[in-house]
Amino acid sequence: MSSSLTPIERAKRIKIILFDVDGVLTDNGIWLFPGAAPGSTVEAKGFSAHDGTGISLARLAGLKCGFVTKRISDTVHLRARDLKIEHIYMGQSYKRQAVEEVAAKENVSLDEIAFVGDDIIDLPAMRVAGLAIAVANARPKVKAEAHYITEHPGGQGAGRDAIEFILDAKGILDSITEEYITEGSAAAAAADIGKGGM
């Protein structure tokens, strides 16, 4: 991978987009409620519907998506299922390993993977990915090493920003958007997210 490539040139190569979760697809808040069993807790997180639509646009464009997060969470599992996410890695203290495993599974090069992060735990994954994206609320060191920084913060459309940047670089954002909103499009229906309430 050439270090002289522009962010747009890097984005043109991308086939897979991997996201950290807390602080990227959420606003970094983790809500813990008492569970039914004594001493147990129920975790809740807030996700952006804009990001959900972005995942549908990515899928419609033929891209695959994944979550790579240190936290193990039923909430993340449910959201991933609703969004039909292809790759889910939880409990990942060393996220680079997950990125390399996804590349091997999908038979793509690391140059063809984008990683979206916000904190220092994401840096090893961002450093090996072909396109390193930091969200607007990322830590300064993470922003300093990113090829692209989203307009919106985590949990407020940052994931959508990352996806739209890649699709725009490929020159297909407008056509994919039109396909998505075309009534009766079988491709759009197949790419769309779940209906929730599962």
Image (spheres, grey):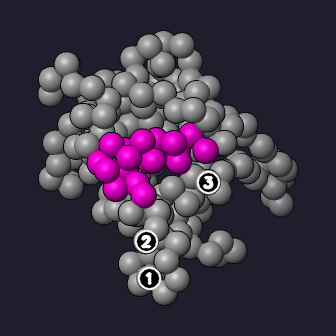
Say which of 36 and 60 sits in front: 60
The quadrant holding residue 82 is bottom right
- For marks 3 and 1, the one nearer the N-term is 3
Viewer-proximal residue among 159 and 165: 165
Q: Is residue 15 left or right of residue 152?
A: left
Q: Amino acid at mark 3?
A: His
Q: Which mark is residue 185?
A: 1
The answer to whether one can see residue 59 in this image is no
Instruction: Report the quarter where the N terminus lies.
Output: top left
Label 1 neighbourhood size at 10 Å, few (<14), some (14-19), many (20+)? few
Quote the CA–CA distance across marks 2 and 3.
17 Å
The image position of residue 151, as x and y in percent, is 57, 32
List the residue tagged with mark 3: 50
Q: Are marks 3 and 1 in contact (CB under 8 Å)?
A: no
Percent coordinates x, y for residue 2 in the rendering: 15, 23
In the image, is residue 141 above or below residue 98? above
Above or below, comparing residue 111 to residue 134 in the picture: below
Q: Which residues are magenta?
A: 157-174
Q: Sort mark 2 into few (<14), some (14-19) or many (20+) by Cα contacts within 10 Å.
A: some
Q: Is residue 113 magenta?
A: no
Query: Tag 3, which secondary structure?
Result: helix
Q: x%, y% of residue 26?
A: 64, 42
